[in-house]
Each structure stands twice: as C-alpha cells, then as structure tokens.
Amino acid sequence: MSDDAQLRPPAPFPANNPFTSGAKEIQIQGKTVKTRTTPRELMDPNAGDVGAGVVHVIEDVNEKRFWEALTDGVRAAFDLGSSAYEVFKATLVEYQQTKTSDGHRDSLTLSFSDDKLNGKKTGMNEAQFQSGLKELLSKGVLSQKAADQYWLNHALFFNGNGVILIKEYRLLPGESAG
C-alpha cells in the first residue's frame, strides 16, 4: 500500500476522550449533526419560538433490529459512505465484545492487518478499512488516541438498551409556518 493511502492521524493526540466534554456538533453536507449523551444537551436556548411539534414513538424491538436501527441511524445522520459504515459496524461489534465489567469502554484498539480487525475476519480489505476509518475520524465518530487506538463517541458507543435518533426539520428563513 502506498504511503498516501495510509491514514495520517493529526498530532498530538488528545490525552483525554474529547467526546466526554459535553455536546459535539459537526457540519456535514448542509446539515448540523449533534451528538449528545443527555437529553438536556439537546435543548437549544437560542432556537427562537417555542412552538414545535414533537412526535415521540417508542418501539420495542429485538436485539438484531436494535443494532440495525442504531447503525442505519448513524449512517444516515453522518452521511457515512459504504466503507465508513462497515468500519462503524465492525467497531461496534468490537465494542460490544470487549466491554469492561461495568459495561463501559472509553477507547478501543483497532488493529487491521491481513483483512482482519483485531484478528477477526471482516470482509474488508486494507484500503476499505483505512478509507472508512479516515471518514469516521473526520466526522467525529472516533478520535485518534494513539497508534491503532481510538476514543469513542459515547453518544454512539454506549451501555444501554435504548437509543433515540432525532431528525429535526426547520423552515428556511423567510418561509411561512402556515
């Protein structure tokens, strides 16, 4: 593999998980993607009018559907390409399989060689993995901690049995609400 194709992480790496210091947001293709770990952080005191319609649907699903909903929701929210989506899913599996006794991890080792992630076959090649990893880093899903080690965004990697995926629609300036 050429040197240009290798992931070149920025230096220096953060000493602490940058995702634990509160709300994060990133601009992706004309939309703002916010990750939060508490509902209070979702409130926007500068939103203007309080009048907003909210529809909250709670659905009980089996484990397979839960993980599909989470991964599909993250894919849509962050506009993940196919390689980033596959790396996210593989990282989520690693997270689930390596949680500590309290069910929480702050970071993960992601070592890829011979088409295997941490020794497990993935169905990806080196170029796909590096491309997907680079996209996850650029979009705030992961943050480099050290060589082959990554901080986890706790809004996306968590110990729980529920996930809330929110998509908010706002009228364009100058449009009428009716």
Image (tube, rainbow, N blue to C red):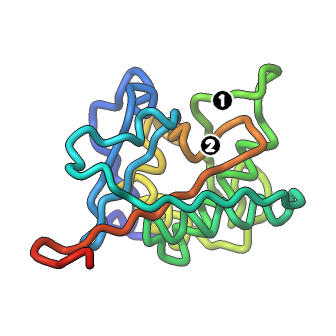
Task: Please indicate whether residue 70 sits to the left or right of residue 165 in the image.
Answer: right
The residue tagged with tag 1: helix, strand or loop?
Answer: loop
The vertical placement of 178 against 140, above or below, is: below
Residue plotted at (54% across, 42% down): 155
Going by the numbered disc 1, the residue's amino acid type is Arg
- Amino acid type, mark 2: Phe
Q: Residue furthest right?
A: 62
How crowded is the residue under tag 2: few (<14 C-alpha within 10 Å), some, or many (20+)? some
Q: What kind of element bears circle 2?
A: loop
Q: Foreground residue, 49 or 5?
A: 49
Q: Position of residue 74 (x, y in %)?
A: 55, 62
Residue 19 image offset from top left, x and y in percent: 43, 34
- Residue 87 as seen in the image, left or right of residue 63: left
The relative height of residue 54 versus residue 118 in the rendered view (above or below) is below
Residue 173: horizontal and vertical position, in percent?
12, 71
Using the image as rendered, state which of residue 114 and residue 104 is in the foreground: 104
Residue 121: mark in rendering: none
Label 1 to label 2, Cα distance in Å?
A: 8 Å
**Residue 124, image quadrant:** bottom right
User: Mark 2 — residue?
Assistant: 157
- Name the residue rendered at 39%, 69% in the picture: 2
First-in-chain label (1 vs 2): 1
The reply to whether dot 1 and dot 2 touch (C-beta < 8 Å) is yes
Q: Position of residue 137 (x, y in %)?
A: 41, 52
Which residue corresponds to mark 1? Answer: 105
Q: Which residue is depicted at the point 75% across and 52% down?
A: 93
How many badges with numbers are in the image?
A: 2
Residue 14 found in image quarter: top left
**Labels 1, 2: front one:** 2
